[in-house]
Each structure stands twice: as C-alpha cells, then as structure tokens.
Image: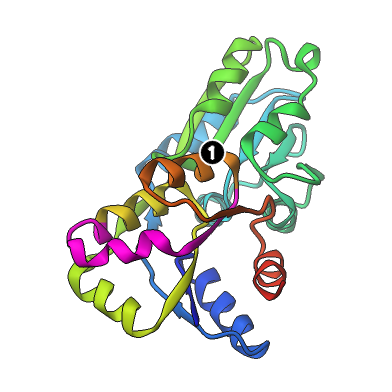
Amino acid sequence: MTILITRPLPEGKKLVSMLHDVGIKSYLLSLIKFRPGSGLKKLLNQISQLKNRDMIFSLSKQAIYYTNIYLNKNNVTWPSFVKYYAIGPKTGSILHKYSGHNIVYPKKKYNTEELISLLNTKEIKNKTAIILQNKYGRTLLQKRLINYGVKVNKIECYEIIFNNVDGVKIGKKLKEKNIKTLVITSGLILKQFHKIISISETNKWILNCKIIVVSNRIANLALELGWNNIKIIYNISNEKIINTLIK
C-alpha cells in the first residue's frame, strides 16, 4: 500500500521523506505551485496607514514568505505597534521569525473558525486589519471582521498556479502504485484533484480510497465529491499527518 501526498513543495517533499524514514511508502503528486501576487504592490501603502493595535493576519506560510521578501526589497520592517495573528503554530513561528513580534494563533484546531474565536470583538471594533493570503483564500475571516466593525484590507501576497497533469496517465500511475490513502490539506487541492481524476471513468476507483483531510469543511467537500471513507485531523503539520498514518 502507498500513500498519496498532495501537499505543495517544499512541504510535500519533506513529508514524503519523513514517511520514508518510518517505513511508509508514499508518492508525491504536486498539483499547485506559487509565485508572488500582484496585490503586494498595495502592501506598503496599507502598512503605512496602520495605527496602534491594528491587526495583521497571515493565513499561510507562503503569504508570510512573499510578504517578507517584498518588505525587505523595499527596506520596510514589520510594524511593531500592531497585533499579529496566524492560522496555526507553524505559520505563527515563521511570522515570529521574520517579524520579531509576538503572534496569536489557535492552539488546538488550526483553521479560520478557531482563529476568529480568539478575537476580542470589543477591542477590535473600529480597528484596521490587513489579511495576507492568496486570491483563492476563504473570505470567512474578512466577512466576520467587517461584521465586527473592522476595516479590512485583503492583500493577495501570492498566486497559485495549477500544474498541468494528465488525468488518465496519473490515474494509471496511482493504480500501479497501489494507492489506498490520500492526504489532502486544502479544499483547493481537493477540487483540483477531483477535477483531474474525473476526466476518465477508469479513475473512479480512487473514490474508494481513504482520504485524510484537515477540517470539517474539507471533509464535507470530499463527501459531496464522492468519498465516503474520510478521516479528519485538525493539525496540518507533517508530524501530525505521520502520526495519523502510523496508527
């Protein structure tokens, strides 16, 4: 049996290597890649308008990576007078590394809903927030902040590019690899994977595979798309994924 890993590079490659080290066969199928987003050109102006205890939210490691490159290129530092929020501990750790500031992030479930639950709705009213993400990112945080009386500026820090994949060929390859379990870490990747495998009727066997996802939202999407054997983990780290696969 072989595990299909769909995490983007470099995390996908790291996960495959870690699985190999514990004796688990895996196969990496990279469906997306990243590049700097056009929204970065608005970033300096938005940061210059921030005031004391305004907020910066980061919803992915890629958002921090491309934001940091852009700030360094323009000799601008991460502001010290704002509050920083991240979607989870790893994202928070990277944001802390680059910004040097304290980061607030969920401790149990690493998703937008859990992040929103950490907000003090009275304190953030009439404040300004910058959300660092990509154009395919969820709008839940933005909508909820607006409902709380926050002025929101969404910055598309990076773009997602879909890799060209032949659905028929990849379906045959996965069958040869004896794939029984899929690891899907985002709704966007799940939709793209389903789109690819649905090209050919010969790929329908993949819907019988066990699918591991990282939120209730993605689990519901997987159910809608035809999967029934679904396991949810609320921690997107490679270590947690490995522990789940070992059990």
Residue 203 colored in magenta in the image: yes
x then y, percent, for residue 246:
69, 75
> How far from the left and from the top, in percent, is residue 63?
53, 49
Q: Quadrant of the C terminus?
A: bottom right
Horizontal relation, residue 208 to residue 133: left or right: left
Give whichever of 35, 241 is nearer the camera: 241
Which is more toward the observer, 111 or 198?
Answer: 198
In the rendering, at what x and y percent does residue 171 appear?
Answer: 27, 72
Q: What residue lies at 63% left-to-right and 15% top-to-bottom?
A: 150
- In the picture of the structure, the residue carrying the numbered disc 1 is 217
Secondary element under disc 1, as helix, strand or loop, is: helix
At x 25% / y 77%, what residue is drawn?
172
Where is residue 55 shown, x and y percent of the image? 68, 29
Front in this rendered view, residue 247 or 214: 247
Could you tell me which residue is drawn at 65 percent across and 34 percent down?
56
* Residue 204 lies in the magenta-colored region: yes
161 vs 15: above or below: above
Q: What is the magenta range?
A: 196-214
Residue 237's place in the image compared with 178, above or below, is: above
Residue type indicated by callout 1: Arg
Name the side, left or right, on which 172 lies relative to 114: left
